[in-house]
Amino acid sequence: MYEGIEDIYQLLDAGRLKEALIQLQGIGMQTNQWTLRNQIENTLTAYGYMLQYAGEGMDDPNRKSFYQQTLRTAYELTDATNIALLSLKTSAMYYDRIRTFAIQPTKSYSELQMQLETFTEDVSTAPLLYHEEKRLKAEMEKIYQSHESALSELFDKTWVTPFWTDNEAKEAMEILQSMLVSTQDLAVMVSAVTLSLLRVFDHKKFNFLLEAYKHEALQVSQRAIVGIVIAISKHEKRIALYPETVSRLSLLCEEDSFRKNLYTIQMQLLITRETTKIDKKMREEIIPEMMKNAKQLNDPKFRFDESEDPEERNPEWEEWMDKSGMNDKIKEMGEWQMAGADVYMSSFAQLKQYPFFHQISHWFYPFDLNLPILAPLKKDFDGSAFSPLKLIVHSDYFCNSDKYSFALAILGMPQSMRDMSMQQMEEQARMNEEHRDKLEALMQQKKEAKGISRQYIQDLYRFFKLWKRHQEEEDIFRWKFNLWENSLLGDAFQGEMITKELADYLLEKEYLEEAYSLYQKLMNSHSEISEVYQKAGYILQKQKRYPEAIRHYEHADLLLADNIWTNKHLAQCHKLNGDLPKALEYYRKVEAVQPDNLNIALQIGQCLARMENYAEALAYFYKVEYLEKNPDNARRAIAWCSFISGKYEEAKKYYQMLLEQPSPKAHDWMNMGHVYFSMHQIKQAIVHYQRARSFEENHTAFIKKFEKDQNALLSQGLTEEDIRIMLDLLL
């Protein structure tokens, strides 16, 4: 953004219109566009007259509409000024295209429409006109090249034209309504409109997306609704200045189909937040592990046992797979995929360097094997009955740009290698009945809206992350996309179940603040679902807001009395908040229902110990120690309670057990030192204190931890002087 323009936008957002226009007039003088300067001046003058009339107390019924129109105009003039100034000095492709088109104007939308319509007709008639294969191939190549040129020009023209004229908007709409322009071409045009709206808000282009959403082809309508969501997320305040558009959106939000589509896209956009995490895990864990495992599988002891049954795996291999964690990783990857997560970003990221992706429009092409660049592959594709290639091409799990990447990677192989690979893939596929059935289902199944929108969002994600000049574009995937908070779309997310589903997903992914805001919305609407209050309390508990968490848990208890989970967390919060008697009360309730729950027994013991009821506490700790498989925590508690109770030999016995473990803890050495110190066995105390000291960075850190136990040492009859002398001995 040009220097000073951001300040003008802020003034406009705040409704300080006159200040904004005055500043815009000053910055506008730096442009070389006299028409734009005059428009700014005329707008400021007209608004000045309106202010003058208003100041004189003159009644004007059109004042409100005039103000809104002037505000809209001010935004548009600011946009135009920003573009004009950046076009003079910025090397970004967007502005480079603007400069190019200023010298060499593009064809009109009507002319481009004629080219696109002719393409459809030429493709169908060429085989009838040219019977010689070589001649037909040459003519088809010309037809596709001409179409490619027209589609690229359509994309670039739409992308870099800041504002459509009335005539341009009319001609663009005629392209959308044409029966002869292919669905794929329209999908590319919708993407160009969306990308353009990210740069500059144009009301006419936004209306184009609203019309495109009504298109019968899902490829067009689903891209349109994604574009609508992106545009509204970017220009919420701007769109609110157009009452007719607001009314239109309000009516859309009442339609079940729109609400359903919007909810699907909301979830898909939320899922993209996980792509970075998944990508990192794939690159750093799963792929390296798979590569390592592939090497290990070459070891004879990890091969399949082929002596009797070639289908039977070696038990050692199975055991190794479980130990390696690969089974869990593969399962996790499958779960991500089933949930709609983008698991292939890392796999295809390096395959976006082909010249094909240098053209910006190609990032938004629906996959088409008929493109001349893929012609050799199409022959292999058509000749193969059931190959993984067909599975990828027909699958909704792979986005369009990844399909192009895969196809181009195969084409990059030498012909002999490609032929061999295709043969092997087909042989493998033919042996795999599940694969074949899945492919047939995919080929017969009509594309669903959610699959198309998911593919498109992944295509967008790759563009904004991987395009060679992606730094020139605002990365929309840094946005939160909380559509339920949007003033224009929020009505589509009304309803308890939708709100709860969103909140539950956000909680699962640990977006706690956003999840809590939705649970709070449900609670404010007097939700009678106990689970809502439980989860709201859980979030607050994780944030260490214990009194607030307790209130939510208590409300959950009113809706669903004596719930074990609620009582357990009420106990935890009271304990962490320092109310031990109350914590003990709720732990007792859980104990009555789950008498064999050793963790509850341990928690009760800890409460009793902190309340200095050591005898009863020890009874619980002994129970846990006897029944628990890993009783270290219980032993640690027994040792401390015994020490505080003056039962030093018992304390020594249990601390010795802990110190004999492979990795004893620093405070176990410290506490054993306390026992010996209290028994006045100074030399032994010093030995154990020194071992505890070795865990710390310096002596000061050790002293701080030592001093936390001062009251416990004083309770054993030691004096402050004894403690000071001991610390000096350790220095």
Image (tube, rainbow, N blue to C red):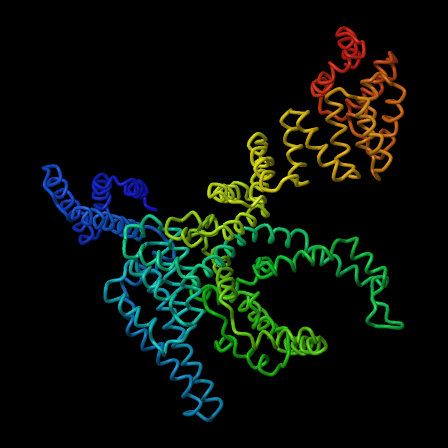
Q: Quadrant of the C terminus?
A: top right
For residue 554, above or below residue 60: above
Residue 295 is situated, as x and y percent measured from the top left of the image, at 77, 60
Is residue 467 in view? no
For residue 542, above or below residue 291: above
Q: Which of these two is toward me, 586 or 192?
A: 586
Residue 310 is situated, as x and y percent measured from the top left of the image, at 83, 72
Is residue 361 in view? yes
For residue 294, which quarter of the picture? bottom right
Task: Say whether residue 647 is left or right of residue 448.
Answer: right
What residue is rendered at 75% in x and 9% in y?
Answer: 724
For residue 178, which quarter of the picture? bottom left
What residue is rendered at 85% in x and 26% in y?
Answer: 655
Task: Say whether residue 639 is left or right of residue 211.
Answer: right
Residue 551 is situated, as x and y percent measured from the top left of the image, at 56, 33
For residue 602, which quarter of the picture? top right
